[in-house]
Structures are given as structure tokens and as C-alpha cells.
Image (tube, rainbow, N blue to C red):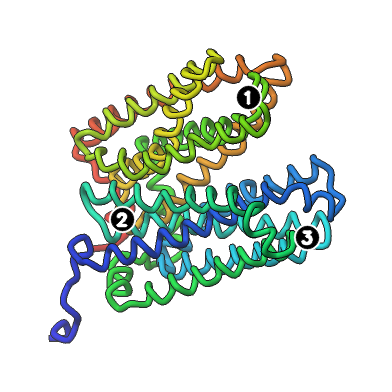
Amino acid sequence: MTTATTAPAIIPHEHPFRWAMLGGVWLIYFSFGLLAASMPPLIAPITADLALSNTAIGSILGAWPLVYIVVAIPCGVFVDRAGVKWALFLAAILMAASGALRAVAPGYITMFLAVGIFGVGGPLISIGAPKAIAQWFAGRERGIAIGIYITGPSLGSVLALSLTNSVLMPVVDNDWRAALMVYAVIILVAGFSWFALAMNPINRSVEAATKKGGTMGDQLAVFGALLRTRSVWLVLAMSIGIFFFFHGMGNWLPELLRQGGMAPAEAGLWASVPVVVGIIGSLTVPRFAAPHRRFAVLLVLFASIGVGAVLLFNGQTPSIVASLIFQGLGRGSLMAIVLLVLMETRGVDAGDMGAAGGLFFSAAEIGGVLGPLSIGVVVDVTGGFNGALWMMIAVSGALVLLLFSHRSAERRASALGEDTSPTSKNSGS
């Protein structure tokens, strides 16, 4: 009769508290976008104050994605074992520490290390957020929830890019160190707000039901089972291609437009269009990606980003506008929908989303690093962006092929009645 004193079972996807948890996840992801975009507007004063070369500041800006690749998988283990509550709180503390250490950095090495710390907090959010959604939402609502929280980093980035120099810097007497410290304080407040929310007994009960136990060997077995699943490999490959496309195009789009004849300020303004369209897309497109329509939605989105690259060959304004809209729709919704595909791939359950998310984002950031680098190499070799655009068109075509391969692999696994869930293989029950 020991079970008589336990709390009634909670059905997360029917409990109204799920929307409060979604708001908390959104707040942490907003903080991520805020800090990620906080330094580009401050490059000029930081470079002058610390006597940095363009190469040095470029390496600093790339510090956190490199760290991200290395730590994403261990962070996935941590998320599964410690739970989303602690993972997102720790992420906020690390991000706030990164912002504060940037504000006091005296030179290149300390600034590089300060930015690198952000690369540890980032994957805790990228992995913890979808795990929270997998715990609290089901069915069509999962797509809606992911579409909502993924607007967080976009809005954070837009605010940092648009308000740092126009509003914040004048308030702090144009002191870039004070500006970064303000962002650090905002993130710290967001972190404690999340922790207060996540300490609610309802969330603690839900987390207890999906928290991973067992030894480190059991955890490694989860990774092994996931990596033996062909469908998981195909999703990882899609994540590489998506980040390759959008990190590459996002970093080089202003320069591409400038070389097409736009003034720098005009090019920067146009380059923000995909971000704004992405916010709208993330709120609308994923809700249509119900399981029976998900393949068709992804097929259209993969084709649309390829068409967006094709349209950039024509330097006329209508073609550019259409291109940026096509890219923005994909930018805002593709990662959300592919995460849904990962959540519902045979062999992955809510309890394994930390491990699966670690693999997903570790692979994705490989594309995030290689995309901008590859475009730079192609432009140097060819002397223009046409070759780079053809490369992006090829990437969109490869994503279509991967999508068909994933559907085939899932159908084969279903026909064979396979259950490759790591949890089912290691739970002992």
C-alpha cells in the first residue's frame, strides 16, 4: 500500500501549467539570442579598446560555436541525468558569467575564454528546450510549442542588434563594458525567474518521470543505440545541412547584397528581412506540420530555400525580396520541424531527448562552422558569389534526398516492427 500516499498522476500535455513552462523556456532562449547578438554591434569599440585585429575579433566571435561542438554531447548526458530544471538554470548562469567576463576582459585571451563559456551554456539550452517540450506537449501542440519558443532567440537577436547602439550605449555613456554587463544582469534575472518556475511541484513530478537513472555505462549505451539507428543518422545529416545553409547565408548575405550594388546600410537592413520573416514563420509553419503532413511541409521548405538561393542570381529588387522571404520561412521553421522529426523517430523517446539533442546540435554546429567557412573559400577561389549560391542550391537538393531516405528508413522500421528505443532496451522493465 506504499503507493497510496503518492501524488495523483499528472498528464503533462493536458495540464495548464505546460504553458507557464513554455514561457520559462522562451525566456531562457530569448536570453541566448540577446547575448549571442550583443557583440557584433560593439565590434568597433571593443576592437579599438583591446587593440585587436580583424582576425583576432573574428576568432573571438567563433569561439563559442567551436566549444559548442565539443560539449554538446556531454551536455546531452547532463540534461538527461539532471533534468531540464537544472540544465536551463545552469545555462543561464553560464551565459550571465560569459557576459560579465566579457565586460571585464583586459585582452584577447580573456575575451576569447569569456566568449567560449557561452558555448557551454548554449547546448544546455538547445538540448534542454526540446526535452522540456517533449515532456509537456504532445501531438499537434508540440509543433505549436516549438514554433513559439524558437521565436525567443530571434527576438533576442533583433533587440540586441537594433537597440545596443541606438538605446543602450547612449544610456551607459557609450561604455561597451557597461553595456555587456547590463545584458549579463538581464540574463541572470531570467535564469532565477526560470528556476522559480521550474521548482513548482508539478514540474518536479513531470521531470522525475522522465529523468534518466543508471550508470554512465547505461548512458553510453543510449548513445550507442541512437547511433545504430539509421533514421537518427539521417536526421543528424539534415541538421548539418540546415545549419550549413543558414549560418553560411546569414553571415555572408550582407556582403553578397553589397557586392550586388547595395550600400552597406541598405544591405544590412535587407539582410534582417529573413530574421523577421523567420519569427513569423516559426509561429505559423510548425503548427501545420502534423505527423501526417510533416514530410510534405519539409519537402516544400527544403525546396523553398533552394529557390531562394536561385533567385539571388537575379539582382533585381523583386527577386531579392522573394529570395529573402523564402529563406526566412525556412530559417524560422526548419529546425523546429526537424526537431519534431527527431522526437518522433523510432528509437527516441522523451527520456532520451537529452542524448538525442546532444547528438543533433553537435552535428548541426559542424554545419554552422563549415557553412560560413566554405562560402568564404569559394568566394576567394572564384572571385564572386555565384559558385557559393550553386553550393547552397546543392545543399538544399541534398536535404531533399535525406528527407526521402528518412521516410524510407522509418517505413522499413515500422514494417519490421522494430523498437530501437534505448530506454526500452535498458530500463529492465
User: What residue is shown with label 2?
Assistant: 134
Q: Which mark is residue 110?
A: 3
Alpha carbon separation for disc pair 3 and 2: 38 Å
Q: For the residue labelled by badge 3, is the local secondary structure a helix, a strand or a loop? A: helix
Bin the neighbour count of mark 1 within 10 Å (Cα to Cα): few under 14, some 14-19, many 20 and up: some
- Marks 3/1 in contact by CB < 8 Å: the verdict is no
User: What residue is shown with label 1?
Assistant: 256
Q: Which one is in front, 145 or 217? A: 145
Alpha carbon separation for disc pair 3 and 1: 33 Å
Lower sequence index among marks 3 and 1: 3
Question: Is 243 on the left-hand or right-hand side of 356?
Answer: right
The residue lying at 31 percent from left, 66 percent from top is 20
In the rendered image, residue 88, in percent from the top left (x then y), is placed at: 47, 65
Lower sequence index among marks 2 and 1: 2
The answer to whether residue 393 of the structure is visible from this angle is no
Name the quadrant containing residue 398. top left
Amino acid bearing label 1: Leu
Q: Is residue 192 above or below residue 360?
A: below
Amino acid bearing label 2: Ala
State which quarter of the image contains the C terminus: bottom left
In the rendered image, residue 223, in percent from the top left (x then y), is placed at: 43, 50
- Residue lying farthest to the right in this orientation: 51
Q: Which mark is residue 428?
A: none
Q: Is residue 340 above or below residue 117?
A: above
The residue lying at 54 percent from left, 49 percent from top is 157
The residue lying at 47 percent from left, 65 percent from top is 87
Alpha carbon separation for disc pair 2 and 1: 39 Å
Amino acid bearing label 3: Thr
The residue lying at 52 percent from left, 30 percent from top is 245
Question: Is 75 on the left-hand or right-hand side of 370?
Answer: left
Q: For the residue labelled by badge 2, is the local secondary structure a helix, a strand or a loop? A: helix
